[in-house]
Image (spheres, rainbow, N blue to C red):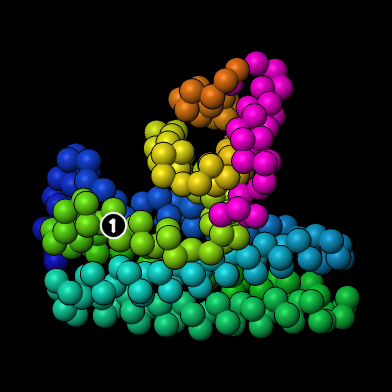
Amino acid sequence: MDQAVIEPALADAQQAGRFDLYAGVHKALRLYMTDTLARVGRADPADDDEVAGAIGQLRDLLELCDLHIEDENRFVLPALEARRPGVTERNAEEHVSHGQAISALRREAAIVERCTAADRPMAVLALYRRLALFVAENFEHMHYEETRLMPVLWAEYPDEALMGIEAAIVESIPPMLMARALHWFLPALPHPDRVGMLSGMRENAPPGAFAGALEIARERLVLRDWRRLSEALGLPSAGADGAADATVAAVAATVGGLRIAERW
């Protein structure tokens, strides 16, 4: 599709409120990537705890990036190829390149962990620069998917089919990784999308999953956003002092107080 066709198609789809398969997950990934890049960049090479924390967050990010590539290769690209053969060639090639970059970042992280104190400043800087390039390449990649591939999906599939693809992706995600994803999804999304996500979880997910998601929301959102979310979900006493803890505890108590990572 050329640009003269793409831009009106995007505008029409957005105005019509079409379901966007990429928007939410890409907002979460952008937040996760930029936060991790900043954390690696500000890590004091002489502080073992700071470096270990930054490396740990980087490894967690890379695990989710691996999963994201796998999910797109398994669920999204086949749907595109089924209707527009050849349209995913660029994306498929970039996924291979991103997988190689992930492996390189893991090697760089291991170098930081093994190197001497004298060598660590340069090793951390090298890791930071490689991560910056990875983030930049992924931002361009995600923009291409949102502006070039999403219009193809809109043209070829109704929203019900696109929602089915998303549901299949969500169902395939291991519980621990889903909890980690929510840690970045919830602060990355605007209020209406946050409400929609958690309302859907309350209706369709096990009670333990909803309780765990509320706990993540309470921990990750600023107080104003948490109160708005609580009010929109109709949770009790959302605005009172100490009510955030009490609200989550009350919901969690109905499922034995287990966290999302243990139940979902």
Point out the image quarter for the C terminus. Answer: bottom right
Say which of 18 and 210 sits in front: 210
Residue drawn at the location 21% of the way across and 51% of the way down: 159
Name which residue type carries label 1.
Gly
Q: Which residues are magenta?
A: 238-264
The x, y position of residue 53, in whole percent, is 76, 61
Crowding near the residue tagged with mark 1, few <14, some 14–19, many ≥20 C-alpha atoms within 10 Å: few
Residue 210 is situated, as x and y percent measured from the top left of the image, at 53, 41
Residue at (36% x, 51% y) in the render: 23
> Residue 204 occupies which quadrant of the picture?
top left
Q: Is residue 78 left or right of residue 125?
A: left
Residue 67 image point, x, y percent: 49, 70
Rendered residue at 67%/46% (across/down): 258
Tally of marks: 1
Instruction: Say whether residue 158 is magenta.
Output: no
Reply above or below: 233 against 120: above
The answer to whether residue 228 of the structure is visible from this angle is: no
Label 1 belongs to which residue?
164
Position above or below: 42 against 239: below
Q: Is residue 116 left or right of residue 109?
A: right
Q: Is residue 29 visible?
A: yes
**In the rendered view, does 259 fall on the left or right side of 138?**
right
Residue 54 placement, left or right of 37: right
Specify the quadrant of the image occupied by residue 118: bottom right
Q: Determine if the magenta segment contains residue 245.
A: yes
Q: Secondary structure at mark 1?
A: helix
The residue that appears at 43% across and 55% down in the rendered structure is 25
Between 102 and 139, the one nearer to me in the picture? 102
